[in-house]
Image (cartoon, grey):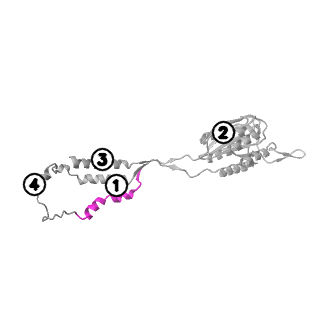
């Protein structure tokens, strides 16, 4: 696409014609009475003076072309390329998912059907991932050990595919929360970003791993990583026994104190998910707290073209000068 930066300069195009027809003509007034008569003046003027012929007369068309080229150059023609979307200053978000044996508990439901904690987390995490545009997302899973399942990347499609393949016990049956947090922090700082965020989801307490929660928390604070923690569990339920009512608390092992401490000391928030609806609301709230820039920033490459008509006009002017002086 081509355009002119200063198209109003086109108004100067008829300027030479206007000056030619508006300016008064120049007359040579010679007082013949006071003139000095030189009988051989004609001979003197012919010495060293080239004879005027039609060959060295400059065509008005040539001068018009010169003027048109200079006016065109003054209008600053530009070539504009296709718009390019600039990469925005993204956030680094690392989802840290507990896949220990307790995540197999079926105390959540979808449309009345029971579903395991891990599966409901995967479903809602998938929805959260779809809403994050322009961010670098990574995935850390942990059980008896912690593992980087996917490093930071803007490729949400691959992350969703890998998330769907996670199964219970893939990383062991215990809960290495300190290892998971430390690994998530290290993953979050691998790529420069506007902010670094870890979303830590767990339904238990730290009972495995080489790194303590305190050490991992200290690392997160030094690296300026904000940690949102989500406790996964259900409300205590009453079961009718043969002779009495029994209270079943599937969230008895949930270490809320530690999860709250992690969130508080890193500037994040702690959430308790007792139901499918609550967990969905938690993801939506985190998505609102860590909003992405919705307005795209685009750039159109441009190239100045004024030098083309300017150079052409200069060449035509030099040709006219040469023709007038030496032809």
Q: Are marks 4 and 3 in contact (CB under 8 Å)?
A: no
Q: Which mark is residue 40?
A: 4
Point out residue 275 in the picture as x, y percentages from the top left corner.
74, 48
Q: Nearer the viewer, residue 155 or 190?
A: 190
Which circle's residue, 1 or 4, is located before the other in the chain?
4
Q: Secondary structure at mark 2?
A: helix
* Mark toward the viewer: 3 or 2: 3
Res 71 label: 1
In the image, residue 145 lies at what x, y percent? 73, 34
Q: Magenta segment range?
A: 1-25
Residue under pointer 3: 315
Badges 4 and 2: C-beta atoms under 8 Å apart?
Answer: no
Q: Earlier in the sequence, mark 1 or mark 3?
A: 1
Q: Residue at horizontal 25%, vertical 63%?
A: 21
Tell me the element at label 3: helix
Give the mark nearer the N terminus: 3 vs 2.
2
- Based on the picture, tell me whether residue 24 belongs to the magenta stretch: yes
* Lateral position of residue 196 relative to residue 253, left or right: left
- Disc on the earlier residue, 1 or 2: 1
Q: How many residues crowd mark 2 within 10 Å: few (<14), some (14–19), many (20+)?
A: many
């Amino acid at each position: 696409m081509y355009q002119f930066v200063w198209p109003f300069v086109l108004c100067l195009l008829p300027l030479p014609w206007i000056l030619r027809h508006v300016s008064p003509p120049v007359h040579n007034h010679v007082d013949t009475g006071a003139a000095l008569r030189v009988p051989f003046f004609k001979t003197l003027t012919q010495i060293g003076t080239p004879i005027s012929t039609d060959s060295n007369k400059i065509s008005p068309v040539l001068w018009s072309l010169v003027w048109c080229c200079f006016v065109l150059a003054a209008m600053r023609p530009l070539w504009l390329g296709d718009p390019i979307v600039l990469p925005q200053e993204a956030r680094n978000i690392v989802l840290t998912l507990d896949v220990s044996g307790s995540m197999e508990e079926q105390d959540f439901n979808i449309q009345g059907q029971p579903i395991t904690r891990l599966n409901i987390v995967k479903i809602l995490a998938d929805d959260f991932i779809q809403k994050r545009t322009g961010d670098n997302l990574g995935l850390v899973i942990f059980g008896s050990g912690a593992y980087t399942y996917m490093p930071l990347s803007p490729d949400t499609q691959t992350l969703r595919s890998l998330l769907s393949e996670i199964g219970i016990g893939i990383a062991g049956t215990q809960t290495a929360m300190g290892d998971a947090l430390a690994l998530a922090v290290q993953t979050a700082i691998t790529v420069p970003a506007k902010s670094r965020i870890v979303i830590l989801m767990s339904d238990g307490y730290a009972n495995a791993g080489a790194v303590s929660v305190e050490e991992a928390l200290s690392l997160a604070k030094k690296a300026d990583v904000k940690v949102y923690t989500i406790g996964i569990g259900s409300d205590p339920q009453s079961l009718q026994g043969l002779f009495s009512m029994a209270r079943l608390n599937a969230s008895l092992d949930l270490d809320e104190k530690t999860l709250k401490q992690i969130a508080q000391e890193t500037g994040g928030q702690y959430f308790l998910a007792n139901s499918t609806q609550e967990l969905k609301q938690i993801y939506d709230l985190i998505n609102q707290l860590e909003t992405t820039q919705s307005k795209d920033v685009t750039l159109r490459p441009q190239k100045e073209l004024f030098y083309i008509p300017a150079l052409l006009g200069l060449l035509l002017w030099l040709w006219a000068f040469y023709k007038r002086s030496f032809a």
